[in-house]
Amino acid sequence: MLIVKGAQIWKDRGLKRLDFSVEGGKLSGFSPSLLPGPHDEVLNLSGHYVYPGLIDPHTHVGLLEEETGNFAGDDVNETTSPATPGVRAIDGINPMDAGIRNARNYGVTTVCVMPGSANVIGGEGVVIKTAGKSVDGMVVSSARKIVKMAFGRNITWTWSKKEKYPSTRLAVGAVLREKLNAAKNYMANPERVCTYEMEVLANLLKKEAIARIHVANLEDIETIARIAREFDFDYVLDHATALHTNVEFAKTLKVPVILGPLNVAGKSFQSYDVTFASVKILLEAGLLVSVMSDAPVIPLNLVRLQLFLVDRYRLDRSDILDLFTENPAKTLGIEKQTGSLGIGKDADFIVLDGDIFDYRSRIRSTYINGNAVGGEDYEMDS
Amino acid sequence: MRKKITNVTIHSIVQKPYKGELIIEDGKIAEVGKTCSQTVDEVIDGKGGLCFPGFIDAHSHIGLNAEGYGFEYDDVNEMTNPVTPEVRTEDAFVPTDAALKESALGGVLVHCVLTGSANPVGGLAFIVRHTPSNLTGDKVVQRDVGLKMATGENPKRVYGAKNQMPVTRMGTAAVIRKYLQDGKNYIEKKAKAEKEKKPFFETDLKLEIAEKVLKKIIPVRIHCHRSEDMLTAIRIKEEFGIRMVIEHATEYLKVREEIKKSGVPVILGPFMSCRPKVELKDMTYKTYKGALEDGVLMACMSDHPVFPSQVLRLQAGMAVAYGADEEGMFRALTIMPAQILGIDQDFGSIEKGKQASLCIWDGHPFDARSRVIWNDQDSWTAL
C-alpha cells in the first residue's frame, strides 16, 4: 500500500488537508492522518497540491502523431468514403507518440482519441489512459462506446475537392440519414449477414454507443438535433462553436457539450464565434460542459492554458476544474472509475508545487493507476 | 398582447384597397375592417401608409449561398449525382444570411427555398418566413414541400462535363422517368410485403420521397425554360399522374394553351436579368401579362441570388409596364404563390385568422422610391 502524506488534496469540490492511500492501483482511504504499516511505502508531499488527473475528451493524439512529418504518422481521417463507421481509432494509435508523452507529463491522465472530421461518420473512438506501451492495456473499459461524426464545412471541403458526394451541406445530413436507415433495415432483417459497419450503427440506435458530433455553426447543430429526433440516438456536441449564441435553444437540447479548442485563430467562417465566454454562458445555462484541446491542434502540454483563460471569467473554481475532470468523465461514462479523488476510484492524480490555478505552479509528477508515470521534469530528464 | 394598426390603406388582396384598421393577436389577424372594436394593449399609427401582406417569393435559393462568404457557403447544388431527392435545403440553410433581412426591407417575408437545377432530380424544398431569430427552426413555415427537378441546359451542361448521363434532354427525361418508375416498383414491393404480412426491411430514403410524389402528397417543382422542356414535363406528369409546378417557364407564351389545359401552375421569372443561356433567348416581361390573361395559377419569383429577392417587387412593376394587370401582379406576389405552395390558409392576404405577415409601405411597392417602414417581425421601424 502507498500512503501519501502531507498534501493539500482536491476532493469534494475543494482543497483539503488529507492523507490518502493507494492499493492495487485504486484509492483506498482518506483521513487527516494515516499511519503507515511496516510494509507500506510512504510518499511525503508536504507543501504540495494533489488534484485528480485531467481528462481531455476530444483528441487525436497517437493518430495524428507529432515528430513524424505529414504522411507517416497521419492516421486521423480515412477519406475514402464519407461514412466509415467500421474503422476504429484504437487500430491507429501509436502509444509512443510524443503527444501522449506530453499528456502525462503535463497532467492529462485520460484522453478520448477519435477519428477526425473529414467524414460524416468517421469511425469508433476510444478512451485511454496516457501511459503504456500497448494501447490495449491503456483502454478505459468502463467508457461508453463512441461513434465519431462530423457536420458542416470540414465535410464539404474534403468531398467537394474530390467532386464526390457530399460536396454541399445539402447532402451531409442525407449521408447520416441514409446510413442510419440502412442500420434500421439491418436490425429488422432476421436473415442479416453480419457487417461490422452496421453493428457499430446498430449499437448507436440501441443506445449502447453515443455519437460524438463535430459541429461549429448553429444551423448545423439544428440539423443534428432534427436527425437525432428522427432516429432517436444519444449524442454529444463537440466544438459547438456557436451554440452560446442562442442559449434558449441550447437549453432545449439537453446534451453534453465539449467546447474548444478556444485559444485558436478564426481561420474559417466556422470559427467566427469562438470565445472563452461560451464556457461561462453554457455553464450558466445548466449544460454539462467540458473543454477539449483537440490535440494536436492545441498540444496537451498546454491544456492548463485553457483553464487559466476560463478562470478570467471569475467562475466558481470547482466548476472550472470540473470542465477538465468530472464533466468529461461523465460525458465519457467513466465517472465511477476516474475524474475525481474518491475511494474505489483509479489512483489517477497529479502533484503540483502550488495551486493549479497559479500558472507558475508546475506538475512535479503524474500518477496513473497508482504508478508515477511522468511530470514536467521527466521531459527534461529524457 | 393585442396590437392595433390604424391609419393605413389596407391592401388585403381579396378586396379593393380601403382606409382601415386591423388587430394582431398572437401573431394572427384577429380583426380587420374600416374600424376595429376590440380593446388593445398597443396602437401603431401607420401614418397613412399602405399595408400589404408580406410578399411570398415562391422560388429562391436564399440562405443556401449566404452573402459575403464565398464558396465556403455555397450549398445550392449537390452536383455529384444526377438523382439526389434525399438532400434537403433545410439542412443547408443559413438563417443568418444577410439577404433575409434585406428581403424584408423589400417587403418579402416568406421564401420557398429550393435546391438548384444541376440535377434532374434535385432535392426537397422548404418554406421559411422572416423572423429576428438566428435559428432555422424558428423560421420554418413548412418542410419538405416539394421535390425539385430540372430539365434543359443545366443538367446536361453539368453532367456533360463529366461525360455522365444525362448529356442530352433525352437523357434528363430518362433519368427522371427511371426514378419515378423505381418509386412505383418500390410502392408495389412495400404493398406486397404488407399484404403477405412480412416485415419490410428495404426502406429506401430516396424512394420514400418518390412515393410521396406518386401519391400526390408533394408536387414536383420542375425547372423548365424552353417550350419543349415544359411539354416534356407535362408528358411525364400525365404518365405518372403526379402533381407538378413549372418553374421559370420562360417560353410560357409559346405553349400557353397546353399549359392551361394541363392545369399546372407556373412560377415565372427571373426576367429582370440578361440572357446568358440559349434557353433564355425569348425571355420577356410580357409573359406575366399572358399568364394573368390565361387565368393560370402564377407566381413571380426572384430565383435569389440570380436576382435579389429584395427587389422582387420591381420585377412585378416591370411586368405592369409591359401590360400586366397591376392587381394581378400583386396577387402573383401574395395569394397565388401561397396557393401554389399550399400555405394560403395562413399567408397571402390580409384576412381574419391568417398569420399577421404584414408590411407597411410609405408608397406604392412598385415605385422604386418606396420603402417598407414597418413589418410584423422586426423591432425597428421607420414609422
Image (tube, coloured by chain):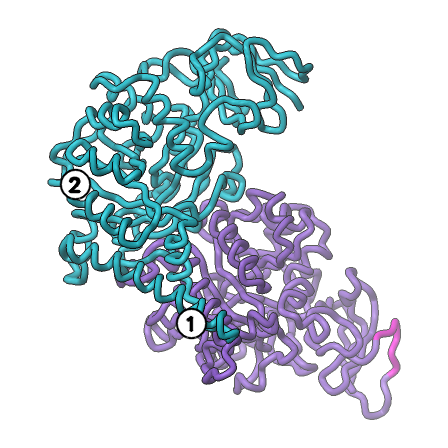
The residue to which callout 2 is attached is B226
Image: magenta residue range: A30-35
Q: Is residue B369 above or below residue B55?
A: above
- Asked whether B337 or A253 is in front, the reply is B337
Q: In the image, residue B47 lies at what x, y percent?
A: 50, 7
Taking the spot 56% from the left edge, 70% from the top edge, the residue there is A205
- Asked whether A266 or A221 is in front, the reply is A221
User: At numbered mark 2, what does the secondary structure look like: helix, strand or loop?
Assistant: loop
* Callout 1: chain: A
Report if residue B247 lies within the magenta region.
no
Taking the spot 38% from the left edge, 36% from the top edge, the residue there is B340
* Callout 2: chain: B
Magenta region, main secondary structure: loop
Taking the spot 20% from the left edge, 55% from the top edge, the residue there is B172
Q: Tell whether label 2 touches label 1 (CB within 8 Å).
A: no
Chain displayed in purple: A
Q: In the image, residue A206 lies at what x, y percent?
A: 59, 72
Q: In the image, residue A24 lies at what x, y percent?
A: 74, 87
Residue B242 seen: yes
- Asked whether B159 or B72 is in front, the reply is B159
Report if residue A34 lies within the magenta region.
yes
Q: Is residue B23 above or below residue B219?
A: above
The residue to which callout 1 is attached is A64
Chain displayed in cyan: B
Taking the spot 61% from the left edge, 54% from the top edge, the residue there is A308
Where residue A49 sits, quadrant-wise, is bottom right
Amino acid under disc 2: Arg
